[in-house]
Image (cartoon, rainbow, N blue to C red):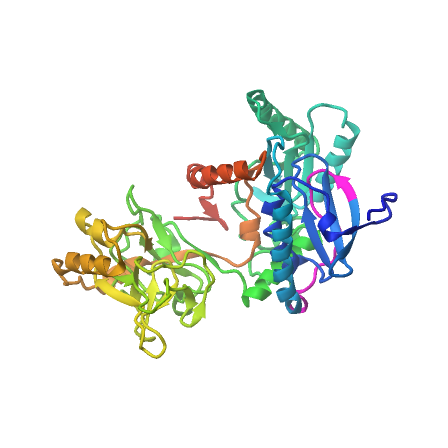
Amino acid sequence: GCYRHNRRRAWWLHREQLERSSPNIILKLLSVAVYRTILMPSHWVTIRTIQFWRPLLLAHLLLLSPNAVVVSAFTLTMGLLKVGVPQPWEKSKKNLNYVRKAGVRQFISTYNRVKDLKGDELLWGDEIEYGIFVLDHQNKKVRLSLRAKEIMDNLNENEASHSYESEGCNWVPEYGAWMVEATPRRPYNGYSVDLLRVERNMRLRRKRILTELNDNEIAPTVAVFPMLGALGDDGSVPPVPVGGPVTESEYIGDGIINPHPRFAALSANIRKRRGEKVNIRIPLFHDVNTPEYADLPGLPPSTCCGEESILLWRFGKGDLSREKYGNGFVIVGCSNSSREFNDFGDPVTLQKWLVNVECEGCKGLFYRSAPGVIVPDADWPRNGDVVVGSEIPDVPGWIRLQNGYYLPMKSDDGEVKFLHKVSSETHTNNQQKKALGSETPMYRGSVGNFNNVPDLKNALETAVSSLSNEHQAFNDEAKMFNLRPAIHMDAMAFGMGCCCLQITFQATDVDESRFLYDQLAVLAPIMMALTASTPVMKGRLAD
């Protein structure tokens, strides 16, 4: 049953009797388990109903029994959760198994409830993030202004007093104490006339945020504050000391993070879960007088890979080159180059391998994040796929793929063979590419008209038989050209402190949501490339 009291009391209801809401809730529920693991106490779980910019029902569910919940319900516009005390990582680990299972059950239950809903109105809107900076004309410096919460509260108070107007804004906090996010108060719909509202509302948001700034403050819509982490203790107003228990950073202080406990808990728990600080290394641009390149003579002042190739570099915990060269260097390469280097910058020989697990009922191999560590990635290579990688000298029987994963060549007892070598060098001839796969890390698809794996294997081996097995030796000069000085960053603020423009949709049903997702999955990378705007990180030019 459902007993509705005043807003200070609770609604008692069966878990399966939660109010029906938009199919787009499914997209948010996918992240419930992760969100709860990192941020929320063990007895709380959060659901967002995605009725975009309609009054949103944020329900905080206190788990009383397997079948019942108590819900403290209130209505507000799109914004940030304000209830809950974050748990530290060590304390939350004991609840991880429950969180995963509960998240899956919630998703399945919600999906079954809303999968057949039809006829929701197509609604959408944009979210713009602003960075607020202080101009110090006397010292010729620009610093972060940590007044974002004060500015946001004043803006929302003014918005509430003008709620009768047809066009308005909504202001919500972001990761940085210098950042504010703004959205239109009323969503756009599916009519072309609403396209005329977009720029008008963007101009309105800019006018209103400017009214709250001091004379020496600006709020440009730039992707990143170029000097973040480069100014030490003098990087913000008011100044905050570098470091702190949350980030343990060598470049930024905990005080520049939004005071809401969500953000500090997010930073600390991710660092603890990783077992180390964030480690971001980006190739440093090589100009004529760049001091880091003074000890690397002979390098040309450019690492351009050409118009049909892009610069690549490894990153993350699997990048072992940091142990050899430290945080100040990174191993780079070009996407269409036949040269390949291992984690330590040493040259290796790329080879192509046919996946064919020779046992009944076996369909392929799971990826490994390290030898012996299975990764539950849905895109694991199936029988008949061709992968590109190199053998690991120190770990016999394993290969490292270009995409960073590992695969075993045979079973532990050696009785079942998993991988069959079909090539020992990269190929550029079109006919060879057709038979052996593209130069991408993973090739999948039919190769000719083959009915089974043995036929495919024979065709690949035939194509390889005509190729030369001679390999070009990599000399010390080539190795040196692959090692580059790097811009090092060690905190989440360097990523979460970036600003962007986002678009959110409420589709009419699940099928339309899938269609929009499939289209945007293609367009989004193109849009990201066209709008790339982070040439400066931590005060240095990136390559």
Residue 405 location, quadrant: bottom left
Looking at the image, the residue that sits furthest to the bottom is 413
Give residue 202's position: percent from left, percent from top: 60, 28
Can residue 253 be seen by looking at this rendering?
no
Q: Residue at coordinates 45% horizontally, 57% vertically from top-left? A: 378
Between 282 and 5, the one nearer to me in the picture: 5
Residue 480 is one of the magenta-drawn residues:
no
- Residue nearest the observer in this picture, 296 or 418: 418
Residue 387 to residue 511: above or below: below
Q: Residue at x 56, y 38 (%)?
A: 502
Q: Say left or right for 163 vs 505.
A: right
Q: Is residue 484 visible?
A: yes
Q: How many marks?
A: 0
Q: Residue at x 46, y 61 (%)?
A: 316
Q: Is residue 300 shown above or below 92?
A: above
User: Would residue 91 be counted in the magenta stretch?
Assistant: yes
Q: Which residues are magenta?
A: 74-92
* 101 sits to left or right of 261: left
Residue 435 in the image: above or below residue 141: below
Dominant SS of magenta comes to: loop
- Give the image location of residue 248, x and y in percent: 60, 63
**In percent of the image, x 50 and y 51: which residue is there?**
538
Foreground of the two, 366 or 306:
366
Q: Position of residue 131 (x, y in %)?
A: 60, 41
Name of the residue lying farthest toward the top? 193
> Residue 139 location, x and y as percent?
58, 43
For residue 456, which quarter of the picture?
A: bottom left
